[in-house]
Image (cartoon, rainbow, N blue to C red):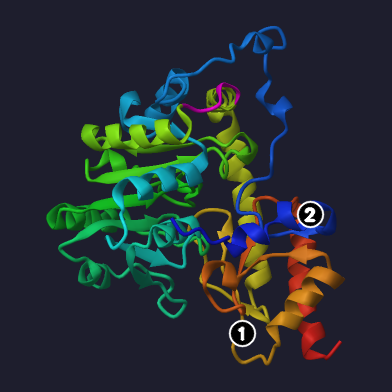
Amino acid sequence: MKYVRMPIEAESPEQVGYERIRFNLCESSMRDRPLSDLHLDPGEFPKLLLAYGDHMGHPGLRERIAAVSGVASDEVLVTAGAAGALFIFATSLLDRGDHLVVVRPNYATNIETPRAIEADISYLDLSFAENYRLDLDKLAALIRPNTKYVSLTCPHNPTGAMISETDLRAVIRMVESKDCRLLFDETYREMAYEQMLPTAASLSERAVSVSTVSKTYGIPGIRVGWLLCRDRKLMQLLLSAKEQIGICGSAVDEELAYQAMLRRVEWMPWIHRRVREAFHTVRCWMEGNPHFEWVEPQGSVVCFPRIRPALTVEFDRFYQVLNGRYGTFVGPGHWFEQPRSQMRVGFGWPTPEELAQGLQNLNQAVQDVLDGK
């Protein structure tokens, strides 16, 4: 493994320092929840036994995840966040020189972990000009006889683009016919604006789904994610990897995740309403915007606008002004190996007031640079 620190982590809000950020538009999740939102029984939680847990994960938590995912509870492997799930999958299936296909741009771990393994990667590059649409013909052309898996993300991070269920099923047929696998990062699945896709793992034993409580539920601090896998032989391999990395998960984290999932029915209407309101704010900001253009997202709480190409903007200066003068932070394009004219804007984390002002600050920062201020 040849590890390289990812810019998305080195320049993250928690590393920059939250005290420097007044308008945080670089988070890719709902706003962080306090522990009090779980309404824990003060008499029962202190009795939690801090022992080794089930190596597959908290049984009650796996049952709750399975119930909303269309799989059985023994087809759920709880991991240390979605990042842990992606690491387990990549290191279990790939050796140096093994081939995979990865959509780009993407959440950095989907690319950097295979690179650290020194795998042979083919990139399926999505473009602004094509509305970040997944081209099935281009994907098929990249798959080789020795391809281990295809790595897709939907709703897509950082653009919020989605594929249809028809296309998802077509991709699954493709990997089945090519005797490889599909890794489907569906962290934002429950944030689709229209129809939510079925989990990829529920449709085929050749598909493995990844998700987490971090983004939709706003509790990234407890580090709980999961893999869904119906191939029992592969599941044993993934479990073996988890056991060698850390034996089992944190008893505290998994109990808190279980308590959160018990409140899913209560939380989801509020989450969906908040997402709709925030998306409406961003959409109104984009209408007739003189400085920015975008491909409108179809799910998640992120979008990936760019400064209009006709504008002569010095991008390093733009970020200096945006960060230093206006205390506003976004995810610059280089986090995703894209031009710095593009940026991921997260709209689920900030309050309505912070979001509105942060968006206004983006326009003002561009105008200041154009005016030489």
Q: Quadrant of the N terminus?
A: bottom left
Query: At x 29% / y 54%, what residue is drawn?
Result: 168
* Prevailing SS of the magenta stretch: loop
- Residue 217 is labelled as none
Q: Does 279 lie within the magenta span?
A: no
Q: Position of residue 143 (x, y in %)?
A: 22, 66
308 and 340: which one is in front? 340
Q: Residue furthest left?
A: 177
Q: Position of residue 279 (x, y in %)?
A: 61, 57
Report crowding for label 2: few under 14, some 14 to 19, many 20 or more residues within 10 A (C-alpha). few
Q: Is residue 79 visible?
A: yes
Q: Find disc 2 in the rendering and name its residue.
A: 17
Q: Is residue 132 above or below residue 241?
A: below
Q: Is residue 218 visible?
A: no
Residue contact at pointers 2 and 1, CB within 8 angstroms? no
Q: Position of residue 6 (x, y in %)?
A: 57, 61
Count numbered badges in the picture: 2
Amino acid, disc 1: Arg
Query: At x 48% / y 42%, what residue is drawn?
Result: 84
Residue 70 occupies which quadrant of the picture?
A: top left
Residue 234 occupies which quadrant of the picture?
A: top left
N-term-proximal mark, 2 vs 1: 2
Query: At x 58% / y 67%, what residue is drawn?
Result: 335
Q: Is residue 237 above or below residue 259?
A: below
Query: Viewed as shown, does residue 233 lie left or right of 255?
Result: left
Identify the secondary structure beneath mark 2.
Answer: loop
| Magenta-tinted stretch | 248-252
Q: Does 251 lie within the magenta span?
A: yes
Report crowding for label 1: few under 14, some 14 to 19, many 20 or more residues within 10 A (C-alpha). some
Query: At x 68% / y 65%, what residue is drawn?
Result: 330
Query: Viewed as shown, does residue 127 lie left or right of 365?
Result: left
Q: Find disc 1 in the rendering and name its residue.
A: 308
